Image: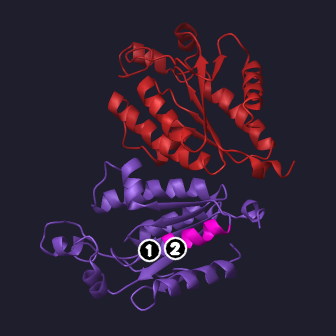
Chain colours: A purple, B red
Amino acid sequence: MKNKKNKTKGFTLWFTGLPCSGKSTVADKVAEKLRKKGMNVERLDGDNVREHLTKDLGFSKEDRDKNIERVTYVAQLLSRNGVAVLATFVSPYIARRNKTREEISKDAHFIEVYAKCSLEECKKRDVKGMYKKAIEGKIPNFTGISDPYEEPLNAEIIINTDKETVEESVEKMMKKLEEFGLI
Amino acid sequence: MKNKKNKTKGFTLWFTGLPCSGKSTVADKVAEKLRKKGMNVERLDGDNVREHLTKDLGFSKEDRDKNIERVTYVAQLLSRNGVAVLATFVSPYIARRNKTREEISKDAHFIEVYAKCSLEECKKRDVKGMYKKAIEGKIPNFTGISDPYEEPLNAEIIINTDKETVEESVEKMMKKLEEFGLI
């Protein structure tokens, strides 16, 4: 098994979905499983990326696109060097996601993962109380409330995070990665 | 030799020096040699980074520091995943370079490479005519003319690019990397 690590083909699992749809929860578990297989794994999410790379950006369409542009560059560099990248970003715009797909696919595998969860359920979860604030008008440009979310048309993997348990979604993803020959 | 790739410890070679001091020329040749050894190699320089990551930044001290901050994050992610990163940036400020050292050293090797070349020689080379423009006042914040360059105090490698040939500098670097147990 030790050699497995060295044979890893790099890839990016790009999780998109509404706030509170469960992207990070599933991604963290998948990342853990991949690490156990001896892979080099990196998690990219809003928190670590905005801290190091995009502190200057807000949430307008333009800034969101810039944010994803920079993340794309990082994910591309990592995955073309054999790393399994799990990126979790609302990334609400199809055009920008498609550019990301195009760029990363040049020299690695790109898998779009749609964390599909009804807006009602996301609002109910409201982990950080952000939906509440957005509905009260205290946060502008909030996806699902005051900003659009464009659903993926061609996601390689759809996890139904309002119907499946976390374990089921993780299992589904691991099976797909096997099917794609990536693990 | 094929296995060599997989045993590579990641590292960042951080080239600092005045504009036209020869950082990129030497880094490109070293990168080529490392690739031939089967290593995963990435070159980061002002051109590719400003295109993808830092398009929004100028050359004030604040913007230079932000530029290096973002590059540092990328170099850190890559080198902790086994990649040999060769980063070539004027990076004139000691404090910022030391932060870079600190961050990358957390989980990979960091080697500062000082491309030491007299200002006179750099001005004479003036590859893109930038010194001329800076002296004429057409480019503000130009390191060596209207902006300071703080020489490294503890660079692991010094290449005297106004005294050595490119080949000699490359040779010196490869020997050092061997000494450090990195190749």
Q: Residue at x 52, y 38 (%)?
A: B47
Q: Amino acid at mark 2?
A: Lys
Chain letter of disc 2?
A: A
- Is residue B162 one of those drawn in magenta? no
Q: Are marks 1 and 2 in contact (CB under 8 Å)?
A: yes
Residue A164, horizontal then vertical, whole percent: 46, 90
Residue placed farthest to the bottom in the image? A163
Q: Which residue is mark 1?
A: A25
Chain letter of disc 1?
A: A
Q: Main secondary structure of the magenta part?
A: helix
B92 vs B28: above or below: above
Q: Residue at x 36, y 34 (%)?
A: B63
Q: CA distance from mark 1 to mark 2?
A: 7 Å
What span is in magenta? A28-37
What label does residue A156 carry, if any?
Answer: none
A157 vs B81: above or below: below
Residue placed farthest to the top in the image? B120
- Is residue A34 one of those drawn in magenta? yes
Q: Which residue is mark 2?
A: A29
Q: Residue at x 45, y 47 (%)?
A: B53
